[in-house]
Amino acid sequence: MTRVDVRRSRAWFGAAGRSGMIYRSWMRNQGFGAEVFDGRPVIGIASTWSELAPCNAHLNRVAEAVKRGVWQAGGFPLEFPVMATGETLIRPTAMLYRNLLAMQAEELIRANPLDGVVLLSGCDKTTPGLLMGAASVDLPAVMVTGGPMLNGRFRGQDVGSGTHVWRFEEELKAGRMTQDEVFEAEGCMARSNGHCMTMGTASTMACVAEALGMQLPGSATWPAVDMRRFEVAQQAGRRIVAMVEEDLRPSAVLTRAAFENAIRANAAIGGSTNAIIHLLAIAGRLGVELTLDDFDELARPVPTVVDLMPSGRFLMEDFCYAGGLPVVLRDLDEAGLLDGGALTVTGRSIGANVAGAECWNREVIRPMAEPLQPAGSGTAVLRGNLAPGGAVVKQSAASPELLRHTGRAVVFDTPEQYHEVCDDPDLDIAADDVIVIRGAGPRGYPGMPEVANVPIPAKLLRAGVTDMVRVCDGRMSGTGYGTVVLHVTPESAAGGPLAFVRTGDTVTLDVPARTLTLDVGDDELERRRSAWKPPAPVHGTGYGWLYTQHVLQADHGADFDFLVGSRGAAVPRESH
C-alpha cells in the first residue's frame, strides 16, 4: 500500500459510490477540477481572520500566500475559519474563549478531510488556542503567526502598543497630558496591520511557537506588512505538504525538550507571564509533564538579552532587523542553555536551524555576557500561605526596590470596585500599601482577564508615585509593567486564601525568597474560611456556565478538565 492510499482525505475524496460522489461534487461547485481528488495531500488552513480581531484582520492575505505554497508543492489547500479571540475588543476577556477556540479547531480538523493543517494566528490567545487544538488531533501541523505592527512613532519617539497605553493613561490622570494629545498619540501607536509590536503576549507567543519548533525559523518577528511575512507563509505552505509525506506530527515536535527550550527562550526575550498559562495548557494536551515550578527553575540561569518594551527600549521591528529569535536561540545553544537536538517542523533540529544566525545589532539583542537583565531576573514563581498553588511576578518589569516589600493590604473584591474609587482624592491609600484585587481568576470573573496591573491611584500619581505592589488572581497584559503579583492560585472564587484577606492585614512580598505571605495566623485564617461564602456564579447557562464548571486553575493552564490529553485524528464515522 502506498502512502497516498493511507491518507485521511482518501476516506472522503477516494470513496466509491454515493458517498464519494457527494464529497467530490459539492467541492466542485467552488470550481475545483477533478484532478484535485487524485490523492494529493489535502491541507487545511485554519484562520482566525476577523475584522473584530484587529491583530488578525490581514490573515486572509497571509492565507493566500500559504495556498500558493501548498499548490506549488502539489497539495490541495482549503481555508476554513476558526474563532478569532482578539484581546482588544472582546469582552469580558479573550481568555474566556481560548478554550472554545481550541475545541473548535480540534473538532474541525478532525471532522474534515484533512491530511495536515497550517495554523494562522495573530492576537495572543489565538496562537495557543490553535496549538492546543492541533496537539489534541495530532495531524501534521505548522504555525504561521501574523506578525507585529510597524513601530509606533509619536512626536519623534518610539511608541509601543499596550505599553504606552498604560503610560499615556498615567500621564492623563496626572494632568501632564491632554485628551486631545491622547487621541493624537493613539493614532500613532497602531499604524499598520499586525499584533502588538512590544514584547507583549502576542509577540511572546509567536516567539514561543518558534522556540517550540512549531514555526519556521525566523518567522516570528517579520512585521505583518513586510513582504517577507508572506514569503515565509508561502514556505510554510510548501513545508506542510512535505510534513504530510514525512508523517511529522506535533507529538514528535512538542516534547519535554521543546517546552524547556520555550521556557528559556521566553526568559531571554523578557516575554510575557501569560506564556506560562498557555505552555502549561499545550503540554497538558500532549501529556508532557510540565509544572509551574519548571518556569522558575529553568529560567533562573537565563539572562534577559532582548532590549524590548515593556522591559527595555526597542520594539519588534528592531528585534527582527537585529536577527530575530534565531540569534537568541543560537546564543542560548552556545551557552549550553538550549537543547539543540530538539526536532522542529523543518525536519531538522532547532540547533541546526539557528547555527548560522547572525546578529546585526547588539544593542537590541545583547550578548549573553552583557545582558539587559542578569540571570535570575526573569519571571519568578512565588509560594506561601497567600498563594499555596503558586503565583508569578515578572521581575524585569518590576521596580527593584519593591521586590522585597511589606505593606498594609487595601482590598477590592473586583477590579471594577477599584476603578470606581481609584481617582478619589480622599481614597485611604498610601504609596507603601499593597493593592489586592480579587474576583479576577478563571472562575471568578470568569476568564481571568488582564486586569492585575491596575493604575496607581490618581492622588499618588500626582504626588510622583510610579509603582506600587499589586496582588491579583488575574493576569496582566504582556505589554504591561509594574510590581504586580499575578495568577494567585487558588483564586478567590475557588476559596483560595486571597478570598480571606482584609483591608489592614499585612502582606509581605519577598521575590528573592520566592514567597508571598499574608501575616495572619492559621487559626484566624480558618475562622475567616469558615465564614466565607463563594460568590454567586456570573453565568447560570451557556458557554460561561460550562467554562466556570470545568476550567482548571492557572497552575494547570486554565484548560478545561475534559480537554486535557490528546484524542487523535481517527476518521469520523461515515455519514452517507
Image (spheres, helix red, strand yellow):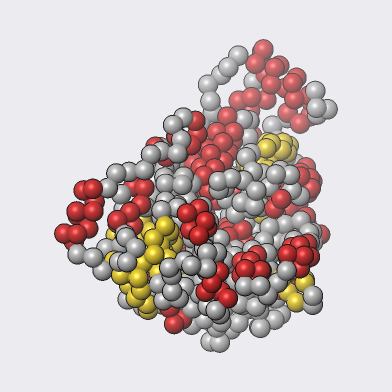
Judge whether 524 appears above or below 305 on screen.
above
Measured as percent of width and height from the top left, residue 148 is found at 70, 61
Across and down, in percent, residue 451 comes to: 52, 57
Identity of the residue drawn at 69% across and 21% down:
23
Question: In which image quadrant can residue 358 be found?
Answer: bottom right
Residue 289, compared with residue 44, is above or below; it is below
Q: Residue furthest front?
A: 426
Relative to 500, is 91 on the left or the right? right
Q: Does 247 sit above or below residue 422?
A: above
Q: Residue at x 48, y 82 (%)?
A: 374
List x then y, in percent, for residue 516. 33, 68
Q: Is residue 113 left or right of residue 136?
A: right
What residue is drawn where x is 71% and y is 80%? 360
Q: Nearer the viewer, residue 386 or 499?
A: 499
Q: Quadrant of residue 506?
A: bottom left
Outermost residue to the bottom: 370
Residue 287 in view (yes/no):
no
Looking at the rendered image, the quarter that the N terminus falls into is top right
Identify the residue at horizontal 67%, vertical 18% (top origin): 20
Q: Quadrant of the C terminus?
A: top right
Along the horizontal axis of the image, is 19 left or right of 260?
A: right
Q: Is residue 319 left or right of residue 394?
A: right
Residue 553 image point, x, y percent: 38, 50
Q: Is 167 in front, or is 86? A: 167
Q: Nearer the viewer, residue 32 or 109?
A: 109
Q: Is residue 536 visible?
A: yes
